[in-house]
Every structure is written in structure tokens, then in C-alpha cells.
Image: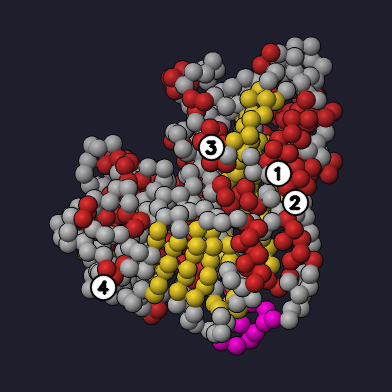
Amino acid sequence: MKNAVRSAAIIAVLAIVAAACGGGGSDTASPSSGGSSSGSEIPSGGTVKLAAVGDVSAAFDPAKEYYQLSFEYFKCCLLRMLYSTNGFAVDEGGSELRPDLAADMPTVSDDGLTWTFSIKPGVHYSPPFADVEVTAQDFIRAMTREADPKASSGGYSFYYSAIEGFDAVSSGDADTISGMTAIDDHTLQIVVTAPTGDLAWRMAMPSSAPIPPNGDAPLGAAEGHTKDYGRFLVATGPYMFEGTDALDFSVPAADQKQVTGYIPGRQIVLVRNPSWDPATDDLRPAYADRLEATIGGDVADLYNKVDTGEIDYVLDAAPPADVLQRYSTNPDLQARLFTHPQNAVSYASMNLAVPPFDDIHVRKAVNLALDKAGGRQLGGGPLTGVNAGHIFPDGLLNNLLKDYNPYATPDDHGDIDKAKAEMALSKYDTNQDGVCDADVCKNILTITSTTDPAPRVAALYAENVAGIGLSLDVKALQTTTMYAKCNEMPSNVPFCTSVGWIQDYPDAYTFGPPLFGSASLYPGCCNYDALGATPAQLKEWGYSITEVPNVDSKLDECAAIAVGDARTQCWANFDKYLMEEVVPWAPRTFTNINEIISTNIVNYSYDEFGGQVALDHLAVAPSA
């Protein structure tokens, strides 16, 4: 996944059929969600059988892997960070940050610049470093590697620019991060350049996971593995790749043999990490002894195998429409279908540096013209989520904007009269009749995905905006190509109708700077709207527009506030500012995820952090 979007998670959600989902009886034992199986103790042992249509995007390298599925593998199973969450949904505390490798929550100086973390003693790495204890320097080693643009290419290193000296390492002006200090083996100090209220959340992301030392190699076990560290990953979680114990870090990196448990494009096999001590980890139950995932195959065929129990869960593809219809309407199957709202949104993005979208009245008119309800129905109806009236999902804003929609239309089907009234205020409507008559309103390049229903939604939206004089030249591209094209500023793409975004962790910051900050204007990232671009950048990229809005100061204001009500209110205010004063998007849907498990699974939990099943909470029946 590119760091802009976990595209499989978002696009797949848009391929679901409308149906009512509810609990029901079953001839088999019903899996519990976050509790014990059928009122008894949750069984341990056995193998969970998984399948994925595609591989992870960056070969399991935590420095660059930016994909929700990879996040879940890291968080549940392979890696422990200073902080994490409990693997449950929000109503069971799943969005609450908790100590993991940290002994407690951090202490923060009065000026908000110095953070001190205490590290649990006695936590060891998986073989072949089973005798090596995790210490403070190991986190510095990980962050130093994250600062290397070669190691973190395509990842999310921008989250750590707040650390003093991090960017100096990235630019090659320093070898060490001046703002990170190992006070002693079990005390880590981090100094930030400005108050950063969610630094502890950022230290819950996989790239911050410790890397063990290896002699005098600056990057320890990761030395020499700029592109392939995932296949030499040393675990701290309850699982490790099969074959990790056979790794030999005493020889040069080029001579080291890779783990057998991960074969790109074919399979992933996780086995228990013998160094993992549950006494030091109260966040991961790790019920199964083994997790096996095949890679590749047809989505429909994989769900047929879930039906028969040959596979227990499909990792990266939503259930096909007919499968979801059957599970949502059959009382005997409903207990194995789980629907959860995600902190995710699908939207149509507008590039503010390309006419006619440099005119705010055009952007507002688009918001009023689009038939959001019709687009959602094409994607599957209410089970896919709720029509979005603003940008940040309600779960990230504590529902402060639950009823806020500045472009509300009857039943969310669009209002062409209101849209025309707004278009009449535009400089591109020379006779103020509500229909754009400038040449820039003709044949507007519009990018969408080839994944159904995206082309049909784009066709609907093209019909909608034709009423205000905008004609769209729609091009459908394979999903990853679509994202690459939409977020590549030199491509000058005006309109993208089927993009989406999901949280990186349960804080609105993960929607703010990545999507709207000037620092995110680079190839492969996430700001599709050109917000914050300088005149020099616009000229370099070939735009005729010389100036666009910049919201960096507002982002910095919210980012500085400590996690809590004041911070949430700041982000809600920012959302309203974007919707009313900037209007970079036409929000479409706050999406749901629908998950189906086999009859072998007797315990299930939805992980609020990862936005999907918590793999370490899956338990299989003893006979499975």
C-alpha cells in the first residue's frame, strides 16, 4: 500500500451489497466477539488458516510498510512497540492507548517538548537474539533507520519529523538523532521541536518497534537490509516468522539466508515466539499456536473455502455481493458476519491548483450536485457505511460533528438548483446562469478505479455535475495506479472520484497533516489537493495557478494540544474550516468493514487500531 491509502481496505468496502445484518441462531457454536466461546474458556492452540488475494506492499519492512493489513500483522503478532491497544472495538476500550513495552504512560515536561519513557525490564527478542533484552537504544536504532529515506521510502517518516534532529538525519546532515537519548537501559528521552500532543500514539506505530543490536553495526540486525529487512525481521511479539530461529546475523548481510515463513506472493507462516512472556504482555492473548496465510487466488473461491472451513478468514478482500447477501439474510449464518464502522472515508478530491477547481464556488457547487446516496447504493447500500457530510470520521471526533453537513441535500441525492446558485457565483460562469461556460469546464480529466463499482459511481457523478456545466473525461485505472496518478502533483490531475483514507491510529492527526499539510506534497503520499504548495513548487510542476491555500498553521495548532477533549474540539473546528472555507473534497461515505469467519473460529474481536480483525484474538475450536 502506498502511504496515502490502504487501498484494498477502502476500495473493497465499496463492493458490498445492501442488506440488513443482525444476529441469529446457528447450528454451530457462535463465535464470541471479545469474550469467551459459548461462555467457556477460550481455547488455545491450533492453527488459524488465512488467505489474502495480494501480498503486503513493502515485504514486511516496518520502516516503509504503510498498509492496514501489515499494521495488523505487526501489532498483533510480530512486534511490540512502546504503546499499543487491546485489540478490541472502541466500546471495549479499543481506542485507548496502553503501555506495551513501556512500563507506564510517558511523563511530559511543562513546555510539552521533552517526553520520558520507562521501558519494561526483562523483555527479550525472538531467536536468534533470545538472550538480548530490549533496551532504550533499540528504539533509537529503529528511529535512525526510519530517518533514512532509502529504508523508509514510501512509508510514513513524516510522523517523526517532530523529533529534534530527525530531519537532519534524513537529509544526511547528521548521523544520529539529537532529540533521542538513552538515559539508561530502561529510560528513553525524546525531545520534540514543538509541542506534539500525540507523540505516544506515534510511538505505537510499527516503524518505532525496537531493533536488536548486532555487534558494532549501527543498525543492528537491520544492517545491510535497506530493501529486505522484512525477511530478516526479529520479533518481540507472541509470534515470529517460521525459520526466524535459523537466521544467522554473524555473516555479512548479503550472505544471510531469509526466513522460510514468508515467501513473497505465496505464503506467510507465523509460529510462536519462544521468547515471548505473556506476563509482560497483557494486550495480546495469542490463542492460536500458528497462523498460516496463502497469498493469491480468486475472491469468490476464497470465500467458498471460508464456507467449507478450508480457510478461516480472508484478509484483504470484502465478501462478494452474493456472499454478503447470503450471510446477512440467513439466520444460520449471521453469527459469523461482523459489521463495524471504520474510521475511514471515501471521497472525491479536487486539485485546487487546476482550473476550474481553483474557484471555491465551483468546489462548493460540486458538493451540492453529487448524488452521494446514489453513489453509496451503487456500492452496496447502507451496509457499506453512512453518507458523509464532512471530512473526519465521527469516531475520531467523538461525534462532535455527527449532524454537521454544510452541503446537505434532500436524502443526500444532490440538489441541482442549489448547485447552480453556487456556480453562478463563480468566475467561470460568465453569465451567472448557474452553468459553467468557460473552456476549463470542458473535458475535465477525472481519474477513478477500475474496481467495481468505482466506474459506475464516476459515471453517476459525471451526470450530476453536467447540470452545472462540468463535463468529465473519466479514465479508469487499476487501483494502485489510480492512487499514484492522483497524488503525483506534476501529473496535474484535476478530479479523482474514488479515493479514500483510513486512520493510522485513533487520533484525528492521522487525517490532518497527511491529507492537507504541505509536508505531504511528495510522490506516493497523500495530499491530492495541492494545499500548501508554494508558488515555486506550482511553477516547477507546470501549473498555471500561482497560489493555493495553506493550512499548516491550523494543523500545527491542533497537533500541539494534548490528547483529550480540547484536541478533539480543535480537529472538529478544523474540519468545519475545511468544509466551509477551503472545500478540498466532496466527502462520500464513512465506510464500514464486513468480515466473515469460518465455523472453526470460536473467538473473534475487531481491532479498532487496525480497522480489521485482531488476529491474535482469533481462536479455533480444538478439533479444527
Q: Position of residue 155 (x, y in %)?
A: 41, 46
User: In terms of sequence position, does the residue under pointer 4 or pointer 3 come before the other?
Assistant: 4
Observer-nearest of 16 and 36: 16
Nearest to viewer (mark 4 / mark 3):
3
- Residue 407 colored in magenta in the image: no
Kind of residue at badge 3? Thr
Local SS, label 2: loop
C-alpha distance separating marks 1 and 2: 9 Å
Observer-nearest of 378 and 170: 378
Nearest to viewer (mark 3 / mark 2):
3
Local SS, label 4: loop
Q: Which residue is mark 4?
A: 130
- Residue 32 colored in magenta in the image: yes
User: In terms of sequence position, does the residue under pointer 4 or pointer 2 come before the other?
Assistant: 4
- Bin the neighbour count of mark 2 within 10 Å (Cα to Cα): few under 14, some 14-19, many 20 and up: many
Q: Which residue is mark 1?
A: 453
